[in-house]
Amino acid sequence: MNLRGLFLKIVRRRRLRQDLEAELAFHQEMSGQRNSVPLGHVALIQEQAFDLWKFNFIENLWRDLLYALRGLRRSPAFVISALLSLGLGIGINAAMFSLGVEFLFSEPSMRDPSSLVSIRLGSNSNASSEVLEFLRRTGIFSDVVGENDEALANYNNGAETRRVFAVYTTKNYFTSLGVPMAEGRGIIPSDSKETVVLSDRFWRTRFNSDPSIVGRNINLDGRLCMVTGILPEQHRSLLGFGFSPDVYMPRWLDETTFQLYARLKPGMSIAQARAALKTVAKRMDSEIPDPHTKYSDSVVIMPVAGYERFATESELLPIGIFFLVLLLITGLVLLIACINVAALVLTRNSARRSEIAIRLSLGAGSKRLVQQFLVESLILVLLGTATGLVLAQGMAGLLARIQLPLPVPIHLQISPDGRVLAYSAVLGLLSTLVCGLMPAWQSLRPVITSNVHREGGARLRRLLIMAQIAASVVLLITGSLFLRNLVNANSISPGFDVRHTLRADVNLPPSAYSAPQRRAEYIRQVLYQVKAIPGIQSVAAARLTPFTDNVSYGSPLRFLDNGEMKHAYFKWNAVTPEYFQVMGIAFKNGRTFAERASGENVVIVNDIFAQRFLNRRPPIGTTFQWVGHSPYRIIGVVSGTKTVTIGEDPQPQLYQPLNQIDNDSLRIQFVMKSAIPPVLQLEPVRRVLYRIDPMAGAQVETMYSSIGLAFLPSQVGAVLMGMTGVLGLLLAAIGLYGVMAYSVTRRTREIGIRMAIGASARNVSRMVMNDVLKLIAIGSIVGLVIALFVTKPLAMFLVPGLNPRDPLSFAVVALVMILTGIAAAWSPVYRAIHVDPNIALRYE
Amino acid sequence: MGKAAQPALLRGTLDLLILHALQRGAMHGYAVAQTIHLLSDEVLKVEEGSLYPALYRLELDGAISSKWGLSENKRKAKYYSITKRGKKLVSEQQATWDRLSTAVGRVLAR
């Protein structure tokens, strides 16, 4: 029957019933006159017709709904515990799901984001404005925009200078992308360079959400820039992943390069655009050649957001897998919660045995009863899902607000959307089945003999609790593995001294430092004056410090001795000669750079670089061509450092002297070795830097606190998995408590008899405890066996050297489980030994 | 509908008989029962317990349609008439029935 017909029938139900009655009355009248057709059963016909019209189904459903609501209102304790269990279970699932979805699949807040693509030509991630203009002129795309999101700016509020995260954009950025604004407008092509768009957070924290700031000037990098508008709070940036810079402004220096983004013309597919772009790249190679790379060597064009980006960017896959594992783990939490509810329902149903028996004997079909039970659990789950969504909102918000030690501002916009709702609905449906079907089936089976039923119910409940213990053991083991991982990660050496060193990250204002000589002079000044601070033993400048940023090169090396070509991939840095001494990086061979640059290009490499690319040449003196035609000579080999994460494999590294590179960056870092605890040097260093140039925003921190990023993966893993494990344990403890309390109540009479004939309190408590321990032992063993298999794929997220089948974690988890079990059983045991035989024998 | 009273006729057969009767023109439920009764030389009796559910089912299937009207004795009665779909159905079912009955006849004749 179609839905419309069904609906019409429901609306016209009364009329249909009257019609039916009139028709049957007519029939009886006629047959009464002629007496030829026997009298039928009017009520039965009516019922059949109503069945045919599906009224009964709907009416039953409605009746079940009311009945269930009445029943639930009578037992608020049951409802609250069920809702808490389900709410927490569904809540944590929805929270993790929304985090994962937001991180991996969110789309930028821009007009028609699906038509936006990012473009990379050749081996450079950034392109000059020449390339951008060339692309725009070809007319392949509706428009081409550029942004440079690695920029920093110095914001001066009149009292102090602060580094803020900036994005330099092309002037058509806001208009082409169609970025919605909360206040004012975006930057438009006719605006001057001295304009800026603020993020909501920056506006809120620095200007107290004052709307009159729009149109006024603020001091950025020593220039007065007019605020044209404020981005909305829920703004999602082009880069995604929650990246949310403080300010957007037109680029100031002409050399600033851009990441390229373009909008596809309507109807153009990515494949078509890629084909067109390849031809353009060839033309660019001949018309605007780049000495470092050939544009046509690598033409990358991909969607900026959503599922398409996930499908094309292989680096996202491990993160996707991590979230998937996380969802499976939190799925286990939900399973535990559902088992709790199922056990509660089971207990409730056994109290309703007589009611069920009466209904069955009055002729209720078992299908009808199952339907009623399912309706009951459906109501529970609906309410539970609603609770869960509220909790999820809180949890996800909390998780998103945890300040991660990142060098870039990350703020995920967590808001419930259709996907999260759909996911929760599916979970809710599955939960209904788990919570409702099992108890329903259990309470129907037995009516034949009530004794069998009671034993059966108890057995099922014990099976459930063992499954629960097994599931929480798996949860706890993954949680403890990630905690151990965090501990292990902390004990791994990053390859340089983090205890006696500190770091200053300086961003020079572009207006005063556009000339390279000015930047070199600044560096010289800082090195000279910081070294004069008492307690500072040595100081060096570097383009990068490990873990805060990294640059890698993938390019062919040509060795000059025999002309061999080798494709090399390595981490790059440019440093002053003292860098290795400050950082405590040991020389295995050779020496550091000379103070004064000679004409010859020299480099220092690490041991991995030497092993991997030099093909058993003696490293010192080996000469190779790298970019361009000038040769580079290796003058030293140092031991390696970690660069991005603490758990990574050793990477090849190459250092150039800072005074030999074309230093185009306004960001420069200094590392210092201190004889006294580095934290005491923070203020003196800040003061010196401020004295040298008050307009330069500087961030000074100890090396130890700056390498936080290195521990990020292990921290995130430990927080998420640990939280899940604790929640699972809590739910399992509640379940265990419920089952033991029930079992003691059920056995009150038996315990009373035992005590009456002389059993001591100790005998009774041992009896009950044995019961608990047996459940825990079997559950834990099953859980440990499952964990052996489940933890295997987790190895990819753990630091090297940590066995996913780490025996210590397994042992600790087993112990925790047993202690939790004893704690959960404590109150039932206490009640058992205080059973008064006189009362107990009168029980039931 | 499992709870239905045992029909006096096979379900498919009753549908066929009703549709066949309605091919003579629109008539009310009682007339349908009477027509079948008379046409079968008073052998087949259709009880209302099976007649009306069958009528409603056929109506839901779209094989017949209904309309309230006045009966020969000036009473309000619900008149059923066969639809195009019903006519198609009746010819199909008649062919099936013919095949079946000759086959059964043959078996019993031997």
Image: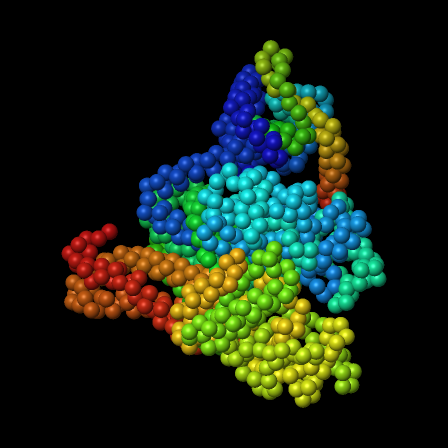
Where residue A98 sits in the image (x, y, percent)?
Answer: 52, 52
- Residue A296 lies left or right of residue A443; in this view the side is right
In the foreground, A586 or A392: A586
In the foreground, A705 or A93: A705
Q: What colouring style does the render use? A: rainbow
Where residue A476 sits in the image (x, y, percent)?
Answer: 42, 66
The picture quadrant where one finds residue A119 is bottom right
> Residue at 17% of width from left, 59% of height from top?
A837
Residue A607 appears anywhere in the view: no
In the foreground, A396 or A219: A219
In the picture, the quarter occupied by the N terminus of chain A is top right
- Residue A200 lies left or right of residue A838; in this view the side is right
Tell me: residue A5, above or below residue A296. Answer: above
- Residue A86 lies left or right of residue A222; in this view the side is left
The picture quadrant where one finds residue A775 is bottom left
**Number of numbered discs present?**
0
> Residue at 33% of width from left, 65% of height from top?
A820
Where residue A840 sits in the image (x, y, percent)?
Answer: 20, 56
> Residue at 40% of width from left, 75% of height from top?
A676
Residue B13 appears anywhere in the view: yes
- Residue A439 lies left or right of residue A647; in this view the side is left
In the foreground, A108 or A562: A562
Where residue A552 sits in the image (x, y, percent)?
Answer: 64, 69
> Residue at 50% of width from left, 58% of height from top?
A694
